[in-house]
Image: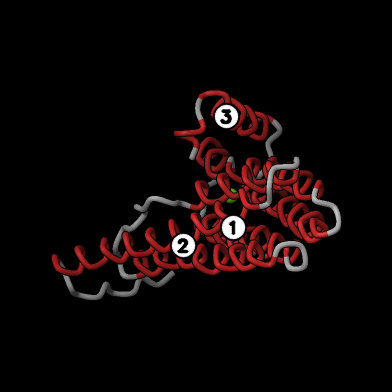
Amino acid sequence: MVKWMGPPFMATYRGIAKLMVKLNVHPNVVTIAGSAGALFGALWFFPRAGTNIYSLFVGTMVVWWCALLDLTDGMIARATGKSSRFGAFLDSTLDRFVDAAVFGGIAWGMIDYHRVTALAALLCMSLGSFVPYARARAEGLGIDSKSGIATRADRLTIGLIASGLVGLGATVLVLTYTLFFLSAAALITVIQRGWDVWKANKLNPALPTKVSA
Ligand code: MG
């Protein structure tokens, strides 16, 4: 995502990371604070979209900035030498909570407003959750599988741009089509990762020996 978001985004991203390093904030605190803020934004504002569509925009802004903060944890951890296995686990597990809250919150807000959009959001939530599962399962089998057309950052960014636009008055169909598109992209990504595993398996079908802590 950071690649295609361009230089202004990269500058903000690096700026936040540098500030956190300067303030000596532990990367796990950044992970928890960013995720908590994003959860709040998604679960407080998105469900209110049915009665006030503008709350979709407010929720998007809160989630956007908090998710951006949460994206810097890895960079902070590397810069301060505080990378840990627990940090990595915490980061990706809390990401799942945020993803569920974002797309679940949209579904909740849209259920009485535009039911097809609610369905698209639920589809996006479930298919999107298979993407990191496929990677984690592959890694558990000792196979690297990070490829795919729609990584989490891509899905979250595109989804949030659409929800922000609809919150500002664009037709709700922008969100509907975007969510269906992201669902399809997530499914393709899972297939791509499955393909990675299939190829790696052909080279070496043996199961890895378990590494104990
Ligand atoms: Mg994070």
Would you say the residues marked 2 and 1 are in contact, meaning their CB atoms lie under 8 Å apart?
Answer: yes
Disc 2 from disc 1: Cα separation: 10 Å
Q: Residues within 10 Å of mark 3 (few under 14, many from 20)?
A: some
Q: Of circles 1 and 3, which is in front?
A: 3
Question: Relative to the observer, which residue lies in front, 117 or 135?
Answer: 117
Mark 1 and mark 3 residues within 8 Å of each other at the beta carbon: no
Label 1 sits on a secondary structure element that is: helix
In the image, residue 208 sits, relative to residue 168, either above or below, namely: below
Q: Quadrant of the C terminus?
A: bottom left
Q: Residue furthest right?
A: 51
Q: Would you name the residue on which mark 1 appears?
A: 95
Tell me the amino acid under the disc marked 3: Phe
Which image quadrant is residue 194 in? Answer: bottom left
Mark 2 crowd level (few <14, some 14–19, many ≥20, 10 Å Cα): many
Residue 13 locus on image (x, y percent): 59, 32
Identified at 31% across, 58% down, the residue is: 144
Q: Which residue is mark 2?
A: 132
Residue linked to disc 3: 9
Between 117 and 15, the residue placed more toward the observer is 117
